Amino acid sequence: MTGIFFMETSAPIGVYDSGIGGLSVWNELRKELSAESMIYVADSANAPYGTKSRSFITGRSREITRFLIDQGCKLIVVACNTATGAAITTLRREFNLPFVGVEPAVKPAAMKSKTGHVGVLATAQTFKGEHFKRSIGLFAHSVELHERAGTGLVELIENGMIDSPETKELLIKYLIPMVEQGIDQLVLGCTHYPFLIPIIQGILPAGIRIIDPAPAVARQTRKVLEEHKGLNSKLSVVGYRFYTTGDPASLSRVLEQLTGSQHLVTKLDGLPTAGSGQSS
Ligand code: DGL
């Protein structure tokens, strides 16, 4: 943040991700902060971010942040490990409002591990990010990390193929080597992956803990709101709005599965379109 920020308590919280994955965080925010309104942006037209360059992700993050600020948001949750690692430092420097990010939960995994082996499944870009490298430096002395990029998983989830044989095949390919290396903790380092938990549970032997950071992110968001005296009162009307640069029907489908009710999703055409942004 660049200066003093006055938080309007009734203003919405902005939440964004490269696609539908951030809904796993949105869902925890909804439970933890039931009096808060939220605006969610899925940049599905540009998913996955995990194979894109840092400058591309930072550019998209800037555009989405401007949009959320124009909608009156009081705080932004970067509900994407990849965008947090690539862009949150820049966002905090350039915009005068608080940001909460998501990082692979290496610390709780390292603290709980008895075998000394921790698996991390995340995007290739997240492993390159400064946040991940810092987390390893701070918290992973006592354990050996087994890192694996979940290449292809985000695309399958975005295309509604969670329960497909392709998804299971990729998960087996990524997870079994970690099991053989003796992990007892699996860190989900991408907000899309919690949608795969039932399949992951079917692959991993009993006793391996799966760590989704979303509840911790929701608690951290509450803390930041409190620090800024920006927590909403229980008396106001809560509203949720959803935007996507991709196909509104995909986001609607996942929302219906999560909440049991239908939500209107608006196609977001206003943001400038981006180039291919492939990571070199
Ligand atoms: N859901 C995202 C994350 O947490 C982005 C994945 C992607 O778009 O590659 O990393």
Image (cartoon, rainbow, N blue to C red):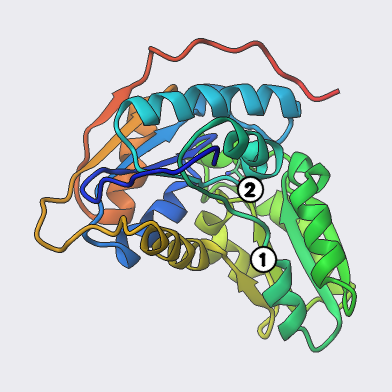
In which quadrant will I find the N terminus? top right
Which residue in the protein does label 2 denote?
81
Label of residue 158 in the image:
none
User: Could you say whether the residue bearing mark 1 is in a helix, strand or loop?
Assistant: loop
In which quadrant will I find the C terminus? top right
Point 44% across, 43% down: residue:
4
User: Could you say whether the residue bearing mark 2 is in a helix, strand or loop?
Assistant: helix
Residue 110: image quadrant is bottom right
Nearer to us in this view, 94 or 14:
94
Whether residue 177 is visible to the viewer of this picture, yes or no, is no
State the residue lying farthest toward the bottom: 114
206 versus 267 height, above or below: below
Nearer to us in this view, 177 or 140:
140
- Determine whether, in the image, residue 10 is placed left or right of residue 212: left
Crowding near the residue tagged with mark 1, few <14, some 14–19, many ≥20 C-alpha atoms within 10 Å: many
Which residue in the protein does label 1 denote?
105
Place of residue 11 in the rendered image (x, y in percent of width and height, measured from the top left):
25, 43
Whether residue 237 is visible to the viewer of this picture, yes or no, is yes
Point 87% across, 64% down: residue:
137
Q: How far apart are the two marked residues, 1 and 2, measured between alpha carbons?
A: 10 Å
Point 67% across, 66% down: residue:
105
- Determine whether, in the image, residue 22 is placed left or right of residue 6: right
Amino acid found under the numbered disc labelled 2? Asn
